[in-house]
Image: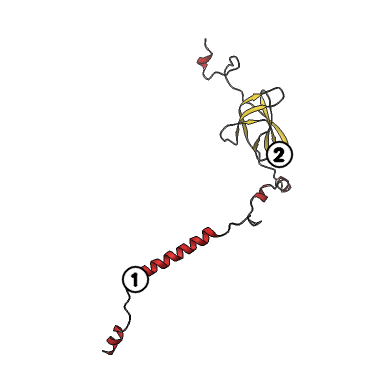
Amino acid sequence: MNALRHLSALPRIDGPALARGSAMLALAVGAGVWAALLLAPAPKSLPPTLDTSAAAGHDTGAVARWFGGGALRVRVAVLGLISSEDGRGAALLAINGGTPQAYRTGQVLAPGVSLAAVAADAVSIDQDGMVERVAVPSRPGSVVQGFIPVSGAATKP
């Protein structure tokens, strides 16, 4: 009987009041965390170990040649061109099998690769200091006044 008297002397736990208190505590902690995240000062610059812009400017061609390997060659396919007598012009090129794009003389095709010149039948590509001539593939069929017909029916009168 004595044990029952001690049990009734313990305070009763109010369930709804405990839930309200827990919710208010969680709300206060969440608001504090978000305030700390949103009001924290932004860093002015990245530490040197995380700064990627500095590493992008380094030329690794000499190191690659030192270990016996040159830069990978870029595959250029000539699909069309507009040339002038002074070697300037534009060309429709597919780089490494990608979608064709128009490039002007002097424009960069890929890192270390630029369009050096455009002739009537080929383009010159400057790749890591080596100029390479890429010819326009010959098209079958006849040419009518400078135009290449799409089908054989277009050449008949």
Q: Residue at x 68, y 23 (%)?
A: 84
Dot 2 falls on a residue whose secondary structure is loop
Checking the image for residue 128, the label placed there is 2
- Earlier-in-chain disc, 1 versus 2: 1
Give the residue drawn at x 52%, y 62%: 36
Q: Is residue 7 above or below residue 98?
A: below
Residue placed furthest toward the bottom: 2
Please give the label number shown on residue 34. none
Label 2 environment density (alpha carbons within 10 Å; few <14, some 14–19, many ≥20): some
Q: Quadrant of residue 12?
A: bottom left
The residue positioned 67% from the left and 37% from the top of the image is 113
Which residue is rendered at x = 68% and y = 25% of the image? 119
Q: Which residue is mark 1?
A: 17
Question: Residue 44: x, y in percent?
Answer: 62, 55
Residue 146 location (% of width, % of height) = 60, 17
Structural distance between the alpha carbons of marks 1 and 2: 75 Å
- Which color scheme does this rendered protein use? secondary structure
Q: Secondary structure at mark 1?
A: helix
- Single out the mark in the foreground, 1 or 2: 1
Looking at the image, residue 4 sits to the left or right of residue 23; the answer is left
Q: Amino acid at mark 1?
A: Ala
